[in-house]
């Protein structure tokens, strides 16, 4: 068994008990334990990214130094070029298979957590506590979708930004937090580009917070509810704008109000992007969430470089 395979099995064995314990804690304990699940899921995602980068750099760093030649260079045998190329291609194929399986398993584990949260929420009578579970479920779902988009691509390190946001909004629109009344009309506008998890995760969670808040609070008396998500490139600065035409942000029970959990997460996630967030009531009615952050510089496409 190769070193990478052993690393994957050891990682899975180490993480599985923690996942089970976190799930049992949420099911058997109080809603606040959801934060423990989210912290564990976030740590799992970060750990997978670290393993990804390690798999790319460790083989070269760990390669033993070539021994001093005991014969003149012209007399020393060397492997034929086709054999060396085949060995390189086999190593790359093994690495890709490992990363694909890793992202796939992480996605499945996060989906299981999301499903269990949904099942538990179905047994809760309090609307407020159900919203807490739905919010936690949507955050886990966001990271699960990211890993699905990662393993569906060929270089395992970037996602199609526009496709990821469209997929995320589609899942949120039919989730447990969606209102029971008229369907919400969503409009998503984003540039077609590849971004890494360090950009996709914060942006995805910001969209999740804003959309979940709108679905939970904004559209009780709105005949044709709408939510617009835009990512605009403004000369090197990106602006993420999420607007709804609901009743507008309110104090107290609204998560996006100053001091709420949603507002706290927005500020922290915006800081991860190197930007700032603001939440305001629109003059024509509804809520506007605005995040400005530097234009992300995509990482080099490893697969394309290998093909060249």
Image (tube, helix red, strand yellow):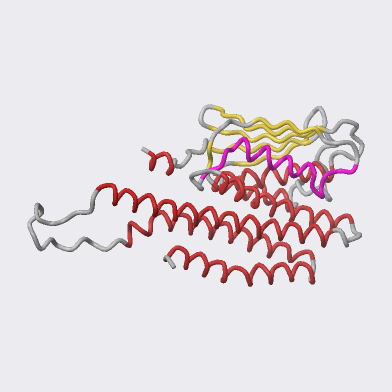
On the image, the x and y values in percent for residue 68 come to 14, 62
Is 126 placed above or below 290 here? Answer: below
Q: Is residue 20 magenta?
A: no
Residue 236 falls left or right of residue 201:
left
On the image, the x and y values in percent for residue 232 come to 61, 29
Residue 256 falls left or right of residue 266:
right
Image quadrant occupied by the N terminus: bottom left
Which one is nearer the viewer's eye here, 229 or 284? 229
Q: Residue at x 83, y 44 (%)?
A: 178
Q: Residue at x 88, y 61 (%)?
A: 124
Q: In this picture, which residue range is highlighted in magenta?
A: 158-180
Which one is nearer the viewer's eye here, 186 or 3? 3
On the image, the x and y values in percent for residue 284 come to 81, 27
Q: Is residue 165 magenta?
A: yes
Image quadrant occupied by the C terminus: top left
Residue situated furthest left in the rendering: 72
Number of numbered discs on residues? 0
On the image, the x and y values in percent for residue 137 come to 74, 55
């Amino acid at each position: 068994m190769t070193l990478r395979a052993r690393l994957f099995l050891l990682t899975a064995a180490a993480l599985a008990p923690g996942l089970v314990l976190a799930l049992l804690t949420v099911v058997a304990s109080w809603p606040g334990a959801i934060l423990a699940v989210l912290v564990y899921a976030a740590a799992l995602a970060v750990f997978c990214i670290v393993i990804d980068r390690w798999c790319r750099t460790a083989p070269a760093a760990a390669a033993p130094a070539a021994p001093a030649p005991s014969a003149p260079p012209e007399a020393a045998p060397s492997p034929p070029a086709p054999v060396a190329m085949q060995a390189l291609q086999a190593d790359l194929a093994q690495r890709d298979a490992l990363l694909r399986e890793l992202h796939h398993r992480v996605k499945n584990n996060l989906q299981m957590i999301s499903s269990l949260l949904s099942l538990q929420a179905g047994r809760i009578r309090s609307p407020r506590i159900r919203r807490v579970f739905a919010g936690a479920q949507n955050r886990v779902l966001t990271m699960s979708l990211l890993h699905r988009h990662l393993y569906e691509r060929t270089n395992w390190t970037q996602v199609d930004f526009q496709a990821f946001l469209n997929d995320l909004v589609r899942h949120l629109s039919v989730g447990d937090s969606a209102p029971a009344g008229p369907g919400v009309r969503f409009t998503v506008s984003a540039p077609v580009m590849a971004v890494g998890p360090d950009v996709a995760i914060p942006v995805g969670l910001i969209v999740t917070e804003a959309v979940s808040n709108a679905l939970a609070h904004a559209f009780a008396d709105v005949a044709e509810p709408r939510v617009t998500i835009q990512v605009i490139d403004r000369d090197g600065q990106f602006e993420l704008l999420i607007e709804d035409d609901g009743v507008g942000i309110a104090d107290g029970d609204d998560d996006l109000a100053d001091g709420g959990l949603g507002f706290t997460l927005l500020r922290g996630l915006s800081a991860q992007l190197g930007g700032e967030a603001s939440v305001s009531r629109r003059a024509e009615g509804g809520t506007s969430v605005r995040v400005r952050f530097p234009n992300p510089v995509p990482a080099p496409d490893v697969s394309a470089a290998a093909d060249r």
